[in-house]
Amino acid sequence: MKIKLSPLEREALLLGLLSEFFSDQVSTGELLRRLRKDMLNMSQEEFSSLVKISRRTLSDIETDKGSQSLSVLGRAFRPFGLKIGLLPRSQQLLKKILEKEFEATDGQGKVK
């Protein structure tokens, strides 16, 4: 039985997983696997069909094997409202950037 999450539950799950990702507690592959299973409650077959990649490629991404193109990774993360980009390796620098961005907005992503 598939349980649907409310929009607030989905947002909380996404924020929690992204927090773990940005603090290097989970890998890119683990992040995708948990988003697929916990947020969408989809099998690899269902999800790979949705994002138009092979199940094998999805499995490789989720187990951090191989080297997928940015295009493939972008398609895999798009259903979650995420895009592939560059991040600083330094946690302190990432934190400063995010704090600066938060200060420049009203906390809702809108410029003050």
Image (spheres, rainbow, N blue to C red):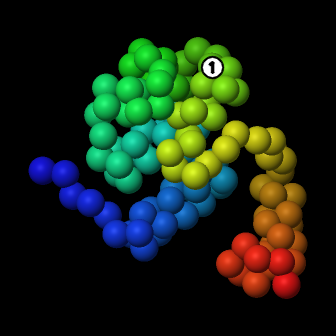
Give the residue at x 76% y 41%. 85
Q: Where, by quadrant of the figure, is residue 91 drawn?
A: bottom right
Residue 6, how many percent across, how many down? 34, 69
- Work out whether residue 103 can be spotted: no
Residue 20, how many percent across, how many down? 56, 55
Give the residue at x 81% y 58%. 94
Q: Where, by quadrant of the figure, is residue 96 drawn?
A: bottom right
Q: Is residue 28 above or below residue 82?
A: above
Q: Taking 36 as reference, is 31 left or right?
A: right
Q: Secondary structure at mark 1?
A: loop
Give the residue at x 71% y 81%. 107
Residue 55, how many percent across, how many down? 39, 19
Q: Is residue 67 above or below residue 102?
A: above
Q: Is residue 103 above or below residue 50?
A: below
Residue where numbered disc 1 is placed: 68
Q: Where, by quadrant of the figure, is residue 4 drawn?
A: bottom left
Tag count in the figure?
1
Kind of residue sitting beneath label 1: Gln
Give the residue at x 64% y 17%. 67
Q: Depth check: 51 or 21 in front?
A: 51
The C terminus lies in which quarter of the figure? Answer: bottom right
Q: Depth check: 54 or 17 in front?
A: 54
- Work out whether residue 11 can be spotted: yes
